[in-house]
Amino acid sequence: TEVGMIPTELQQLWKEVTSAHSAEETTGSNHSSLDLTTTCVSSSAPSKTSLIMNPHASTNGQLSVHTPKRESLSHEEHPHSHPLYGHGVCKWPGCEAVCEDFQSFLKHLNSEHALDDRSTAQCRVQMQVVQQLELQLAKDKERLQAMMTHLHVKSTEPKAAPQPLNLVSSVTLSKSASEASPQSLPHTPTTPTAPITPVTQGPSVITTTSMHTVGPIRRRYSDKYNVPISSDIAQNQEFYKNAEVRPPFTYASLIRQAILESPEKQLTLNEIYNWFTRMFAYFRRNAATWKNAVRHNLSLHKCFVRVENVKGAVWTVDEVEFQKRRPQKISGNPSLIKNMQSSHAYCTPLNAALQASMAENSIPLYTTASMGNPTLGNLASAIREELNGAMEHTNSNESDSSPGRSPMQAVHPVHVKEEPLDPEEAEGPLSLVTTANHSPDFDHDRDYEDEPVNEDME
DNA sequence: CTCGAAATAAACATTT
DNA sequence: AAAATGTTTATTTCGA
């Protein structure tokens, strides 16, 4: 199997990464996505990112923010500032193992995150996470620029720009960024650069979804290109919430999740719609399409039961029925797991598989973020387990079908009260800031109506 | 290549 | 009457 060759492949990746780096530094090239990363990460520093409000320069994310040079050349010189180590814990995505001192951290790093299939996969995932974020950031910056232009703000006004910029970037990247490409740069394997992934030109990966056919396109979770990623559950939530990436779940799974997350385990059609738009940026477009799909799924699958209610009807889930059809189809997600081991997409689907399996098991896919993060540790380990399991018996059909497992209700009384909202408002990027800042106090149901797809050509 | 699952479309029925 | 909800059927795509 190709799994075996991963390590080699990884090294190759490093190679590409490094070379890309040098290339960029010498040519001062632009569209290098790395630029962005670096930039945002360091933007918090007082130094300064002269945000050029140049109408031309914007289109592609290459904000001319340039940090003069990459000083801090490596953690080697600063033994205690390893990018993957901070606040006494391992910053490896999804890890968070506690390491009292740097030594134990190194030990941990070498034992837990050695060059193996899993680490490789996680690494790729991280790369893609960064890419996605970069794209998102680029978009938002453009948007900001347009806003400022519109409001006649002087381009070079360092004041106005930095503010929102930092806000956004810090919020967005806070997690992944710090894990991915910390201040120290070069030869840090983690620093992603050029598209190392299957796809060739950088944005392409993302482009697939955000550029052309925005909104629901005929591609399912198996999609090898716009697969999302992130090895951290909490991170996923934010990720899907803000990136127009199709979630790796079927409509049925999503609907079920929406319903199960509700306090009463039941939702009206409209509430389901709202959940979709609230949780996934991807479903803020082409509403007619996916809503139709939702309705279609509701009445097609026996697992969804309509219950007449005083005021209309609500939908509920028949777990038995749901689990029933799981076996043949995704018992342990054979398909996804398969992917993971077969194609170059390797790690991405893996993550998808992980999530899918978790989702199908009632594990609140997204709770950590909305509720502090008490269970983060557990989840992290859970993830690792899942990962290991998936990797090992890549097919054992032990279908853990333990239906009612982990009640987990109380996630957050999604109290959805039909509140008329302004379609205009609430656009992706903004919600990003919002959701991140104003905690669990959920934004009521935003009604991201499908504004005629335009947003593309960016 | 065939087959089934899932996505997407769309016609049509029913309820609000 | 219009919009929202539900049902169904058909077609397409993709992975097994």
Image (cartoon, coloured by chain):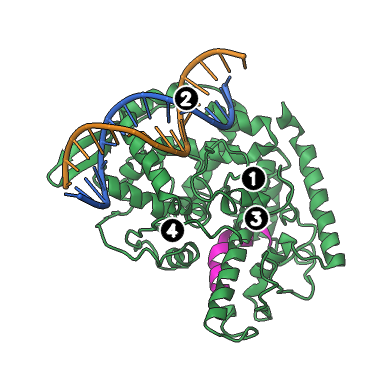
Chain colours: A green, B orange, C blue
Q: Main secondary structure of the magenta part?
A: helix
* Residue placed furthest toward the right: A26
Disc number for residue A451: 4
Q: Earlier in the sequence, mark 1 or mark 3?
A: 1
Locate the C terminus of chain A by quadrant.
Answer: bottom right
User: Mark 2 to mark 1: distance in Å?
Assistant: 26 Å
- For badge 3, the amino acid type reads Gln
- For badge 4, the amino acid type reads Glu
User: Mark 1 to mark 3: distance in Å?
Assistant: 14 Å
- For badge 1, the amino acid type reads Gln
Q: Chain of mark 2?
A: A
User: Mark 3 to mark 4: distance in Å?
Assistant: 26 Å
Of A155 and A130, nearer the camera is A155
Count of numbered labels shown in the rendering: 4
- For badge 2, the amino acid type reads Lys
Q: Are marks 3 and 4 on the same chain?
A: yes
In the image, residue A101 above or below residue A377: below
* Viewer-side label of 3, 4: 4
**At which x and y percent is residue A68?**
78, 76
Q: Give the labeled residue for mark 1.
A: A122
Q: Which residues are magenta?
A: A164-181
In the rendered structure, the answer to whether residue A26 lies left or right of residue A205 reads right
